[in-house]
Amino acid sequence: MCAWHTALANVWMHTGMLRVEGEKMSKSLGNFFTLKEVLDKYPADAVRLLMLQTHYRAPLDFTFAHLEGMVETVKRLKNCVKNLRWAAENAPQDGEMNERDRELGRAVDAAHEQFVAAMDDDFNTAGGLAAVFGLVTAANTYLAEAADDVATSPALRAADMLEELTDVFGVKLAEEGESLPAELVDLAREHAGFEGSSVADAAEALLAARQEARAAKNWGVADAIRDGIAALGLAVEDTATGARLRTK
């Protein structure tokens, strides 16, 4: 797919068909924005997706409302990959795959085939994105229906494929290693009897202690753990495969 990277860069450099809110961009109309001005306020991934939704031979109508929507779309894509990998990591040992698992596998294959066909059709980036969004819908449906019965292999295949396809567009969905605050260790010592020094282990100890407190209906302890975590800029997210910490 690396050949598409070079070709896409070239065709987008030569396109000049840009309109803003339906009008030609011009300083006299007060709708002239440099790329730097836009990137100072919005992530590059969102700008890329906005541009790629329109074929390079067609006029691009730029609006900040559409760009705001692309910011949320990027979050949706990243959350889907994150949820797939989380579910795969916390899934029971792989056994016989059921029809639901096989259906996700077929969706992965179909997305790849659709993406390649679109990109080979005069760099139809809108069609390529449609393939990506179709796989996101299939993956989210799979996670919702499978709950705690996720199979590792198809979940990881779907996550890998989403990252591979969006990488062609220069959009990175992989987590860059979110660092947890060191203060979690002290919080775990206070509420979970934690004696180690690993921040990751402290996080797991806190989640386990919160779960035990909730099971025992000891809401005071459970709320204290939740509030302590929140004070560190994190939130507890309960999923079908267990609880995890995420940044707010």
Image (spheres, rainbow, N blue to C red):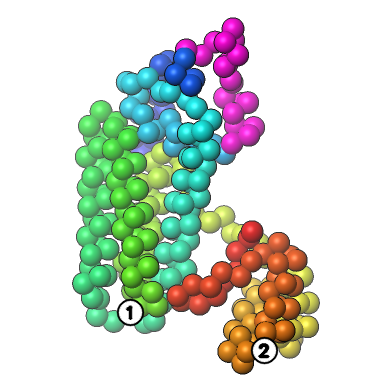
Q: To which residue does mark 1 refer?
A: 94
Which mark lies nearer to you, 2 or 1? 2
Q: Using the rendered image of the protein, determine whether residue 3 is visible from the camera's viewpoint.
A: no
Given the image, on which type of amino acid does mark 2 rest?
Asn
Instruction: Specify the label residue 170 is tagged with.
Output: none
Given the image, on which type of amino acid does mark 1 rest?
Asp
Horizontal side of 133 relative to 22 (left or right) equals left
| Residue 219 picture location, percent across and down | 67, 84
Q: How far apart are the alpha carbons under marks 2 and 1?
A: 35 Å
Q: Is residue 27 magenta?
A: yes
Q: Which residues are magenta?
A: 24-42
How dense is the environment of label 1, judged by Cα within 10 Å: few (below 14), some, or many (20 and up)? few
| Residue 88 picture location, percent across and down | 41, 71
Label 1's element? loop
Q: Main secondary structure of the magenta part?
A: loop
**Name of the residue lying farthest toward the top:** 28
How dense is the environment of label 2, judged by Cα within 10 Å: few (below 14), some, or many (20 and up)? few
| Residue 83 picture location, percent across and down | 45, 64
Query: How many badges with numbers are in the image?
Result: 2
Task: Name which residue lies at 78% across and 77% down.
Answer: 186
**Closer to the camera in the image, 233 or 28:** 28
Task: Name which residue lies at 22% across and 32% down.
Answer: 121
Horizontal side of 11 relative to 238 (left or right) equals left
Q: To which residue does mark 2 refer?
A: 218
For residue 157, above or below residue 42: below
Label 2's element? loop
Task: Name which residue lies at 43% across and 71% down.
Answer: 87
| Residue 231 picture location, percent across and down | 75, 66
Q: Earlier in the sequence, mark 2 or mark 1?
A: 1
Q: Quadrant of the C terminus?
A: bottom right
